[in-house]
Amino acid sequence: MDIIRQKAIESLLKEALPKLVVALEPYLSKTKGQISAEVELLIKEAMALMHILQPVEEKAAGVEMDDDEAKMLLAAMDTPVAAQKKDLSVDMSDDEAKMLLTAMDTPAAEQKKNLSVDISDDEAKMLLDAMDAPQSTSTTASKAEKMSDDEASMLLAAMDKPADSPLLEPVQEQVAASEVEEHVDEVEEFGESEFSSDPDMIKDFINNSDELMATLDEQVLALEQSPNESGIIEEIFRAAHTLKGAAGMFAFKGIERVMHRMENYFDSVRKGKMRVDSLAIDVILKTMDVLRTLLDAVKETKPSGFKTVPIIEELNALCAGKLKSVSKAPPKIEKTEEPEEDQKPKVKKAEQATIRVDLKRLDTLVNLIGELVIDRTRFISIEEELLRKGPSPRLASNMSETVQLFGRHMNQVQDIIMNVRMVPVGNAFNKFPRVVRDLARSLGKEIDLVIEGEQTELDKTLVEQIGDPLVHLIRNAVDHGVEMPEDRLKKGKAAKGTILLSARQDGNQITIEIKDDGKGMDPEVLRRKGVEKGLIREDAVLTERDIFSLIFESGFSTAQKVTNISGRGVGMDVVRKEISKLKGVIDINSKLGKGSTFTIQLPLTLAIVQSLLVKAKGEIFAIPLASVVESLRIEPQDIQLVGGAEVIKRRDQVLPLLHLTEALALDSKDSEFWYQLERDQGTSKLRKLDKRLFVVVVGQADRRFGIVVDSLLNQQEMVIKPMGELMQDIPCVAGGAILGNGEVVLVLDLADLDSIFRTKSRQLVA
Amino acid sequence: MVLPVLSSDENQSSLFSLRGSLDGAIEQEFTNRVQYIGVIIGREEFYLAIAAVAEIIMLQPITYVSRANKFIEGVVNLRGTIMPAINLRKVLGVEKGQPSAATRIIIVKNDKNYELGFIVDSVTYVSSLAPSDVEAKVLYGDSSAAEVISGIAKSQGKVIGILDEMKIIARVCDNDGKKISQAG
């Protein structure tokens, strides 16, 4: 846009808007108390326009106006203009109205014209002239003389038309506008807009709206805690306003309309005309849900067909103060942040210089680095070969030097890329305050959700996938853990229950804890259930922990729910499955009457795994090092039989043993495997010590067991890869990984091995 | 088993006549021709449509996967991608074989659904057949081979079974009780 046109628009608006404000002032005082909220909002809009204009003006010296800004301006202008047309007609002198409408319509119409790319200079001049027009007709006339007659008449026509039409039916509109509770019809969800065809713009809109929705969510819940906090109300109002404007720009009419009502309400609130009560919060939260549906429809680029009228009517009623308020203490949501976050969160935000990167690109990068890790192990094996039988020792030592340096750099790159993928686990916690609030309300419980350590960082994939199991656990804690207020009081507890959701880093692992101070679980009851279900034998000697983990057995949970004894464990088997899919483990601790704690341990990342390579029956297998507790060398006579199961005693602890060859049925290899090539054994030529056995002790949560293997090789970083569609669901195998020599090794799935183990021991028991 | 010797004059000429000349009247026919690669499994030669073949590699070290599908020999590494290798001898019900210098893995690839290897004893050469050279399946009985052969090629007095890679995959999946999406 060139400067002339820009100037034209500016001056037009500068003239028109103050006039508009002045003109509306008397009208406002006349009709005070009736529909002033609407009009006042309009004045606000006008003022906002003025604000938007200011930066534009500053920019005028520059050559170009940002496209986005222009669009924003346009969108912002259209809204008040359209809305105001309707309201203006109430009782104003014709003159005033006319002047106002002319003043308003002209800039809007002209500006639209301006935005189209090809406007001749003549037209621009015309614009400049037009801007004087509303001021005094005489100037227009004199200037118009300089123009061709045609142009002048065109201009005049353009000016008159919008001014005339609304005045033709002032009476009807008067009626419509004076009612706050006007009748609402369904609108097209998606209207026509020049922007909605641009996928990049839509993407921007989606990104922005997601952020705004997150802000709204957070602030609305905060508002519930402190309904009079003007900062929060302002924040909500701003977010709602921005979202409305953006939706309007893209002609997402459904969103715009709902957002408009919400904005109205918060406008009244911030002016002190309304008070926020819990009923209002309910309506607002419902509105947020509707908005989310509508935004999802935008993401899927097809209308959801969702009816917005009910929520709009509800919002209208809310604005009119016609909803009956019921007082009920909402659950309090507390967020305790880590100390350093607490001190200056705002300042820290400003310091963050971030860049948005497409996740796909990042994933490609991570994958490539995974490949590089494999390459490095390959280099190492070449180096070894050179050292062993290379032609020149000098070449070999050069090679090892390079390999070492390369390895050091790779480590750094790996660290960085892993950090890049790390996001605060709090992203997964965001929705929980809402979940707890809604559920507690519907159950009539009072619950505080305390979130700790939300800044702890975790791989993005993990953060995304841990959400569902956590929701499950939290719902369980609300539903079955925390008691009703009266029961709590009877037991001498505070009426309000507390659920603590915390995350912390323990070395290479993340620990997430969900702790409630509810009724806890009764081991005796669980035990009885387990016997009933045939999961344990009546006289089985079990630790409390063993008993608690019964709730993870499928089929156990439903019965619990029906009998309503503790009810914990609806779909707990799914929770455990999902967590072990993430290479994590879950553990339970519970005290009857005191509450339960669920502890989830997850690896920091899934992309690159440190593994211990072992050999059994000539095949190499990888065991994720995070699960390895220790490795031992034992004599065959150390193995003792307990009820048919092999165990060893280790530091006064009984450790059950599992032979890898047996667990994987490796004995059938000889008959099944036809195409075996002679392998280059390399340096890993560990002499098999005739009778001794190697035991790798692995820990799955609190349960430890030993895996008996033929030999231990070495420790290596590897990238676990899928092995193709046909190779899914292979028992005990989590995937494949490629060694330095290009060979594929299988990575053991310890959770699977463990379950085989338990099935086996249960069979032995039965 | 005697492999066809390509250098002998007789074979050479038959190879050319198989391909047909590219000029004149035969051109029309040539466009309808389908190319097949000949593979030896056990004592028999089979054809495999070349459109399905991504590449042919030497026998790689195969990692045995116990408890996998019985037709799957194990997994191999093809430039960083791990894929299953299917033992065609087992699929066709041929007796146990040994790896040799001629053993090859034929990589069959469909960009969407699968990428896997077929282990064959050796690869002969590429033939292009006119539709008239191919007869629809005439095999009866329920031998393992009958299930995965989609037609029979008859030319130059030879009769060669044409293997259908989708049917092989389907058979492997059937055996597993699982289904693989076969779209595309």
Image (spheres, coloured by chain):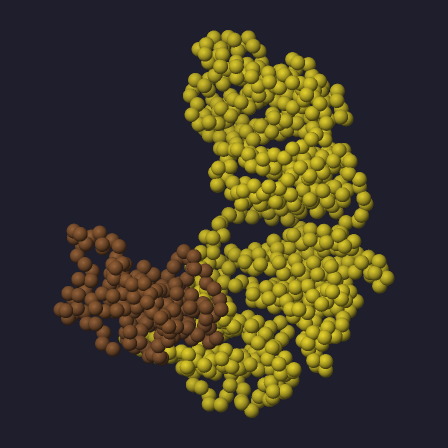
Chain colours: A yellow, B brown
The residue that appears at 49% across and 69% down in the rendered structure is: B177
Q: Residue at x 75, y 54 (%)?
A: A440
Residue A286: image location, x then y, percent: 69, 44
Does residue A7 appear left or right of residue A506 in this picture? left
Using residue A698 as the reference point, say whether residue A91 is left or right of it: right
Q: Residue A49 occupies which quadrant of the picture?
A: top right
Relative to residue A42, is residue A200 drawn left or right?
left
* Residue at x-position 53% and y-position 85%: A633
Instruction: Decide if residue A238 is in sight here.
Output: no
Of B9 and A521, the residue lying toward us: B9
Above or below for A363 versus A323: below
Q: Is residue B46 above or below residue A656?
A: above
Q: Residue at x 79, y 67 (%)?
A: A593
Q: Quadrant of the C terminus of chain A?
A: bottom right
Residue A377 lies, in percent from the top left, at 41, 69
Q: Nearer the viewer, residue A164 or A579?
A: A164
**Residue closest to the eye, A266 or A191:** A191
Q: Is residue A23 above or below residue A475?
A: above
Farthest right residue?
A: A490
Q: Quadrant of residue A410?
A: bottom left
| Total labels drawn | 0
Query: Quadrant of residue A137 in the image?
Result: top right
Residue ranking furthest to the bottom: A637
Residue A467: image x %, image y %?
61, 57
User: Can the viewer see residue A5?
Assistant: yes
Q: Report x, y in % for residue A565.
A: 77, 67
